[in-house]
Amino acid sequence: MTLTLRRSRWLVGLCSALLVVTASGQGGPPPQPVSVRPVVNAQLAPVTWVPGTVVARADSRLGAEVSGRLVSLAEVGTSVAKGEVIARSDTGALKLELQRQQAAVDRLQAQLHYRQQQVGRFQALAERNAAAGDQLDSAQAEQAMTAADLAQAKAQLAEVRYRIERSELRAPFAGLVVEQLAQPGEFLAPGTPVLRLVDVHQREISARAPLAAFRHLSEGQTLPVRQGDRTIELKVSRRIEVGDPISRSAELRLSLADEDWVVGSAVEVSVPESAGSEGLAVHRDALLLRAGQRYVYRIGDDGKAERVDVEVGLAVGDQVQISGPLQAGDLVVVR
């Protein structure tokens, strides 16, 4: 079982220094430079490594918004900016429809103008008792119906203009065209997939943790993530608190900012199996094992190294829990 470390909050990082250990006795060998690290308070917990994947935060299959014959689309591998045109459909039929609707609007505007004048004449005659009231009522009704027809025609005209505008498919975000899902010449119905667009700059890690371990995770917590022989620490950005009833696992996302890992890359994420226990810990290279004895060399106030026997506990990554006459901040020799 692989283990990892969750350090206490006050510990910012391990320091290292070079000290000179004075050889004991007269005529001993010359002082030797050694590397030292402090004893720390650390909370260690057994962990399990779970598979993860580098994913894009925005990965969309973009479809046609209006029907029409596809004229052009961006090539695979093209980087596009937000709002840039990435596909176009033929608008010949729509432009003819636009002309028809514009003509209908012009005709109804002329009719409405005539109806308004007619109502005005009947109102003037009615004031002189020269026209019947039903004639005025009829003229006003025809005016109202013409106005309604005009409003409908204007709406249809706006719809055609909207469809012409939407015949150009624009990128909803900056990204990389990674797949063509249609080809020029194909007739597209609304919703037909055209392109796959991926934001390769906004990436994160997706992994599924066993439900038993998931409850020990929190947003903002740092977890080791490895790819091959490289291991980095990333923060948990989201916990999706819905478990899968088959795998008994739940998804977590980790922020990935400056790494050059390609979308789709396989990684492993170290998740704690329990809350762990807090205690003193040293770097594993500080621990010496000889003939069943376990000890470290502590640097005293006089700069000399002294042997300190310890009991060894949980090992997590490069840290090992110990118990013995040591305290946090003591410097121990690291091989």
Image (cartoon, rainbow, N blue to C red):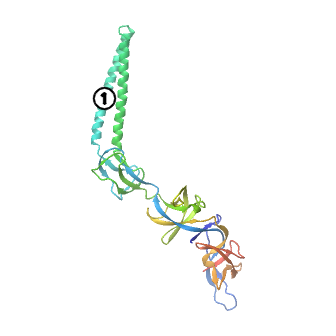
Please state if 320 lies on the left or on the right of 100 as rendered: right
Residue in front for this viewpoint, 289 or 81: 289
What amino acid does circle 1 point to? Asp
Q: Nearer the viewer, residue 89 or 120?
A: 89
Q: Residue placed at 56% from the left, 68% from the top? A: 48
Is 229 on the left-hand or right-hand side of 180?
Answer: right
Q: Is residue 119 visible?
A: no
Residue on which disc 1 sits: 106
Is the N terminus in the top left, top right, bottom left or bottom right quadrant? bottom right
Residue 180, horizontal then vertical, whole percent: 34, 55
- Residue 31, placed above or below residue 127: below
Q: Return the residue nearer the eye: 294 or 233.
A: 294
Q: Position of residue 281 (x, y in %)?
A: 65, 72
Q: Nearer the viewer, residue 45 or 115?
A: 45
Q: Position of residue 315 (x, y in %)?
A: 61, 73
Specify the quadrant of the image occupied by residue 46: bottom right
Q: Quadrant of the C terminus?
A: bottom right
